[in-house]
Image (cartoon, rainbow, N blue to C red):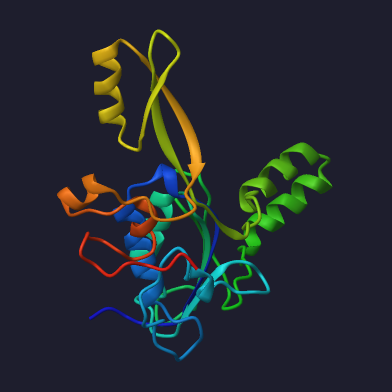
Amino acid sequence: MADRFPGEIHIGGILRVADHDPDDIDLFLDQCAEQPTEWGESGHGDPLTLDTIDEVIDKDTGWITFRDDQACYGEFQELEEICRELGLSYDRTSDAKYEHDGELVRWRPGMEQPLVETADKSGNRMIPSEPIEACLAMFRAGLVEDGIATLQKLIPEIIPLPKFGIDNKIKLYYVEDDEGHHHGPTNDYEEAASMADKINGRIIVQLEELDGCECDSTHEANDTVCRWCYARGRRYWNDPEVSEA
């Protein structure tokens, strides 16, 4: 049986809707809805959408923050994995319990693996005294550059956790023919590529922010919805319509 002890996670960065599969964004929203925002509480309960996710954003810090006193090994494993998939930064702290040390775990886009450091329950890093003493010896011996290099390895530099935000723009593809006329748009690259092949045109990509529902007869025929509706919890054509408020 897994050990359970307190864990806290702060999530920041920009969620760029256009860059990710809607299913991954949906998984992130589901994970956020399951997590408690305060110690001793249960999860949010209601499903979250891109319009309602501000309900779990800490107004003081601008981060999405969850606190779970029964986290499995003090971790938020699935949430941390989907954050990395979506390029969202996070800091996670876990209490020490039994044979497990407390941890400070940080990840930023571009890192191959999270940076894991021993920490106290407040998230303060704990560095063994031996390497600090070795650094002091280097400084006393006049080996300043070696001492600084050793300290930098002990205390890796990492950018501060940014506030959480959403870039709701989507990629739209147009095809320009030989006469400069534009065909489209479509949000399906394969469809744009097929059109370009047929008319010997070139694909033009634009980022545009949708102001509202753009469902049409094609969505109805395929029992799908546009990305604007999908981001707000609607999945199929016959699902209840969502408000533009």
Q: Is residue 178 above or below residue 103?
A: above
Q: Is residue 228 above or below residue 110?
A: below
Task: Give the camera-side residue of 76 and 121.
Answer: 76
Asked whether the viewer can see residue 110, the reply is no
Q: Quadrant of residue 144?
A: top right
Task: Give the camera-side residue of 136 and 183.
Answer: 183
Q: Residue at x 45, y 28 (%)?
A: 205
Q: Is residue 1 above or below residue 221?
A: below
Q: Position of residue 177 (x, y in %)?
A: 38, 13
Q: Residue at x 40, y 77 (%)?
A: 35
Q: Position of residue 193 (x, y in %)?
A: 28, 23
Q: Quadrant of residue 126?
A: bottom right
Q: Residue at x 38, y 59 (%)?
A: 231
Q: Position of residue 218 (x, y in %)?
A: 22, 45
Task: Give the camera-side residue of 2 and 187.
Answer: 187
Asked whether the viewer can see residue 183, the reply is yes
Q: How many marks do you count on the picture? A: 0
Q: Which quadrant would the N terminus be assigned to in this image?
A: bottom left
- Residue extending farthest to the bottom is 40
Q: Image check: 80 left or right of 148? A: left
Q: Position of residue 176 (x, y in %)?
A: 40, 17
Q: Is residue 16 above or below residue 47?
A: above
Q: Image check: 126 left or right of 6? A: right
Q: Image check: 72 left or right of 96? A: left
Task: Give the camera-side residue of 50 and 127.
Answer: 50
